[in-house]
Image: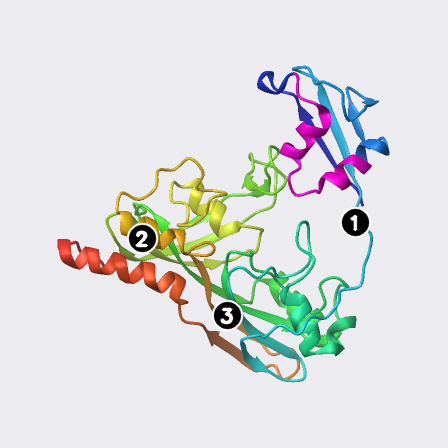
Amino acid sequence: MSERLAFTVGAAESGMRLDHWLVTRLSDLSRTRLKALVDQGRVRVDGHASKAAHRLRAGERIEAEIPPPPAATLEAEPIPLAILYEDDDVLVVDKPAGMVTHPGAGRSTGTLAAAALAHAPGMASVGSHRRPGIVHRLDKGTSGLMVLAKTQRAYDALTAQLARRSVTRRYLCLAHGVPAHAEGVIDKPLARDPRSRVRMAVAPPGKGKRAVTRFRVLERFSEAALVECQLETGRTHQIRVHLASVGHPLLGDSTYGRGRRGPADPELAGSMDRLGGVALHAAGLAFVHPSSGRPLEFASPLPYRIEGLLSHLRRKNDSTGIRRRS
């Protein structure tokens, strides 16, 4: 189904060309696709199809109809995978930060899905043709554990476990500042941010989809905290949005930590620049094997990109005598 979006032109946007305005508001779509939407009459200004060169006026209502991209077959790519477990039904991998889970806006190659398809060609008919075997996803900037299904039976069983919330997913992250409570639950609904299609946001009461994150502070530092999170639901960007909503965005998260001052410690700031993603790692994964019924549990240590930051924070705390453990 097509996605329908509506915006109101702000005073600061008055005078902008419609096509330039669309680039800023729908940044995950290419200029070519945006031009096609305008040419097809799928972008309307105050109810009427408009030209790309139309100069906007404050208060005008912009409506955009965005059809789904045409179906395409995913091409397998022989990219090395860090495989922790494999049998005839499932594949458990440790995804590096920087790798996209499946093709989407702005990335069609170099994905985990393409790498898994090259490793196990039989996955081509499992699940979606663009996301073969993909049961759940991790953001590009997030590293860690994922389970993929190699058969349709396994796919159906694992997605059912996710729906029942019986899959355990444990994350470790470094957050700005220190939460006031040692542990807690963030229960806030999430929805697409109406100002940006690439962001999620906490939705008003009665809107969005329910999202629940349990957190526990493992270590406290002068400028950050090591936090363990467990998902009860699996919404897009859930941990990132939830922690940012209580004033503790993740280190390295330019999307939800926007406008926040960088760390006062120059060495810490330099380490953050080398993160190569968000300081978020899927460290634990547990589920029931779809065929044998045997419980399986996996763990992944923090990658060096995060461990290096953590080591620096610990050294600094030790030198100042600050108590670490919660």
In the figure, is residue 68 to the left or right of 115?
Answer: right
Please, is residue 89 above or below residue 100 in the view?
below
Please state, as top left, top right, bottom left or bottom right, where the N terminus lies in the image.
Answer: top right
Earlier in the chain: of badge 2 and badge 3, it is 2
Q: Residues within 10 Å of mark 3 (few under 14, many from 20)?
A: many
Residue labelled with disc 1: 69
Q: Position of residue 130 (x, y in %)?
A: 74, 61
Magenta-colored span = 15-36
Residue labelled with disc 3: 285
Q: Quadrant of residue 303?
A: bottom left
Q: Quadrant of residue 309?
A: bottom left
Residue labelled with disc 2: 225
Earlier in the chain: of badge 1 and badge 3, it is 1
Does the segment drawn in magenta span residue 39?
no
Question: How far apart are labels 1 and 3 at the CA level?
Answer: 32 Å
Please, is residue 132 above or below residue 89 in the view?
above
Q: Quadrant of residue 140?
A: bottom right
User: Residue 80 versus residue 240: which sits nearer the camera?
Assistant: 80
Of badges 1 and 3, nearer the viewer stands: 1
In the figure, is residue 95 to the left or right of 129?
Answer: left
Identify the residue at horizontal 66%, vertical 73% (top origin): 116
**The residue under label 2 is which amino acid type?**
Ala
